[in-house]
Image: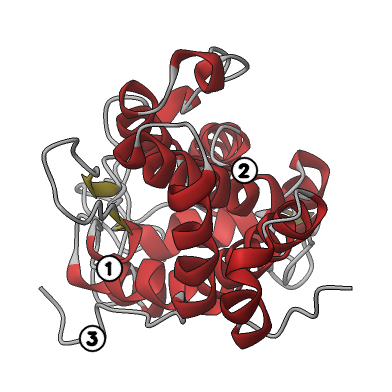
Amino acid sequence: MSDHNLTCRLDTSNLWKAQTIFLRYGNTVPAYAVNRTALFCIQAAQDATPVTSQSRIDMDMQIQMTPIVSFGSKGKTQMTNTVEKTRAMMIVVSRMHPNSKYSLQTGNRWPVPFPDVVGYTLAGAKIGPKAPTPLERMANQMNFWNYVEQVAERMVSARHSSVAFLKASWTAIIEQLLPNVPPKYRRGFGSVDRGTFSKTLLTSEVTPARTNQPIPICIVSNTIGVNGSTDALEDKYNEAAHRILGPLLKSAIDREYQSKMEYAAAQGWRDEAGNIIQCGWIVK
């Protein structure tokens, strides 16, 4: 595993004070109540997690790169390879080389085999008994780029299915929390889906609160930052989790605290006014 920061510290002290009020006055089993609060926070974080649109992926991947060089010789008809290279195609070429910048950044997770095209290397060096003619070199180049374009199309299609990669990472937590909340709070979660990641996106560690605990505690972790198939990908996922998911979860926790305080004040739970004021909430 890469040597990176595996934890993201979030202040939940106010939320716990609010939860204490609900445990004293509410009629839900304490363990269920705590798990329900965790579920609400995780669901709110998932709802707020951004999704990359397929059109944005298409736009990024279809950016035109440097055109292919021309072929021909002095005094003869110029033959120009008109194939244009997109960013997606250049990523495919990078994946053919394990030491390319892209391959190193991804831990060479998605290598692409170099094609066998017309018996010559991409540069036109002789493999067979004769050196290639200009026309053969042109065919060699065209076959190569046709192959690259086909692989690029499959790659872009695969990326379409991963637009909600970060958003889907919360689902594994939700799936483990649902059996540990009152049945009425499980409604509406039947459509939760990890899509194409259902078998591979194992991004949670959940220890739900139990009824036999003197103090009910629920511990949840989104482990997308330590779930990469290579060290390089783990670093990328970890960075995204800290930069995007951490702040979203903190905002969800703060909103849940605010909601609980508003409800507590509306219910007139005056005996807990001291705790409410400690949390920064003024009871009118």
Rendering coords of residue 7 (x, y %):
28, 79
Rendering coords of residue 109 (x, y %):
25, 56
Q: Nearer the viewer, residue 48 or 131?
A: 48
Q: State the residue position of label 3.
A: 4
Q: Residues within 10 Å of mark 2 (few under 14, many from 20)?
A: some
Q: Residue at x 37, y 83 (%)?
A: 9
Q: Nearer the viewer, residue 43 or 62?
A: 43
Q: In the figure, is residue 33 to the left or right of 224?
A: right
**Which amino acid type is marked by label 3?**
His
User: Of tags 1 and 3, which is closer to the observer?
Assistant: 3
SS under mark 3: loop
**Which amino acid type is marked by label 1?**
Glu
Task: Pick whichever of labels 1 and 3 is earlier in the sequence.
Answer: 3
Quadrant of the frame with the N terminus: bottom left
Rendering coords of residue 239 (x, y %):
43, 78
**Which amino acid type is marked by label 2?**
Val
- Label 1 to label 3: alpha-carbon separation: 9 Å
Q: Residue at x 36, y 34 (%)?
A: 32
- Label 1 to label 2: alpha-carbon separation: 18 Å
Rendering coords of residue 73 (x, y %):
68, 68
